Image: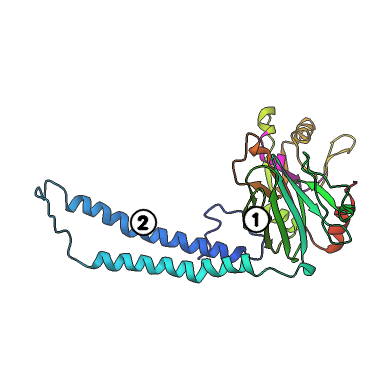
Amino acid sequence: MNDLSHWMGMPLDASGHGAPIDAMMSWVHWLMLALFVIWAPFFLFTLWRFRARRQPKANYYGVKSKLSTYLEGGVVVAEAVLLIGFAFPIWATIKNDFPEVEESTVVNVIAEQFAWNVIYPGEDGEFGRTTLTKPIDLDSEDPRGADDIIVADVLHLIKDKPAIIQLSSRDVIHSFGLPNMRVKQDAIPGLEIPVWFVPRMSTSEFRAQMAKTLPIPTDERRRAQYPPYRWTAMQDYPTPNDSTVIASVGQRLTPRVLERLLEAGVTEVYAAPDMEIACAQLCGGGHYSMRGTVIVHDTQEAFDAALAEYDF
């Protein structure tokens, strides 16, 4: 009953600390609902009770009842319970109780206009220096970075393994947002801010829960802005004649792919979104394009294989 995340439009929770955060937000909304139910009728009552026609001469002594004082005290106590019982413990866990580095997936994320540069350490487990070029690159004079991997706008993680993100920015303030992981942290130039969380749901599990059938718009301009542009196909779509696969399972449904599907007579597509990296800070004219993808693998082997596909 307390979980209002669905009614509040919250994205699907895929993190280890998402449940207590959603619970706290739900309690805050229950408190606001109670205040609305109590105070709104009381406000309307006061407008009627103390209208000028009924009481033309103002009473400068006010209401002598202590009821309002007790009600205000109750609100203060409820807010204190939310802070001390929910917010402070959650904050302390997220900000102080970091997991061991040896047991975690550690990555550097450097934000810039308008991309997320995700840096993975190589076999030595150490990060090399990066350049200030655009896009960011590895400093060839630092031997520690010889085996590092830089991936733009894709964050690879492992299910049930803690992830530690070393977050920074090369230009302006950005905001690193992972809605499904209940993570949001500003990336500030000159500072390296650590963030940690535990992915509890793999990408395949997430897609299975989020998959649904969507119509393909016939209008070309609308297709370019349609949700499946950030979604992936959940089944193969071959052409009716020669069985050539237009879109396979897991393939991104770009406007071009949607156009080919429509030409082949497919008017609906069974698809699912990916977990997203969003910039929650207005960081310039191209802010809208600063989006990335979180891919959570089921095993360490799948994670290693995915990074091995990047050719540097």
Residue 207 point in image, percent of width and height: 72, 53
Which label is found at residue 103?
none
Q: Is residue 295 in sight in this rendering?
A: no
Toward the viewer: 273 or 213? 273
Toward the viewer: 153 or 121? 121
Horizontal side of residue 204 vs 35, given as left or right: right
**Residue type indicated by callout 1:** Asn
Toward the viewer: 48 or 109? 109
Label 2: few (<14), some (14–19) or many (≥20) C-alpha neighbours in 10 Å: few
Q: Secondary structure at mark 1?
A: helix
Residue 190 colored in magenta in the image: no
Horizontal side of residue 69 vs 102, given as left or right: left
Residue 271 point in image, percent of width and height: 72, 46
Q: Secondary structure at mark 2?
A: helix
Distance Cα–Cα, label 2 vs label 1: 29 Å
Looking at the picture, does residue 93 appear above or below residue 120?
Answer: below
The segment highlighted magenta reads 225-236
For residue 284, what is the image quadrant?
Answer: top right
**Residue type indicated by callout 2:** Phe
Earlier sequence position, callout 2 versus callout 1:
2
Residue 61 point in image, percent of width and height: 14, 59
Which label is found at residue 180?
1
Toward the viewer: 195 or 248? 195
| Residue identified by numbered label 2 | 36
At 78% across and 43% down in the image, what residue appears?
136
For residue 290, what is the image quadrant?
Answer: top right
At 81% across and 55% down in the image, what residue appears?
120
Horizontal side of residue 299 vs 113, given as left or right: right
- Residue sitting at the far top: 220
Label 1: few (<14), some (14–19) or many (≥20) C-alpha neighbours in 10 Å: many
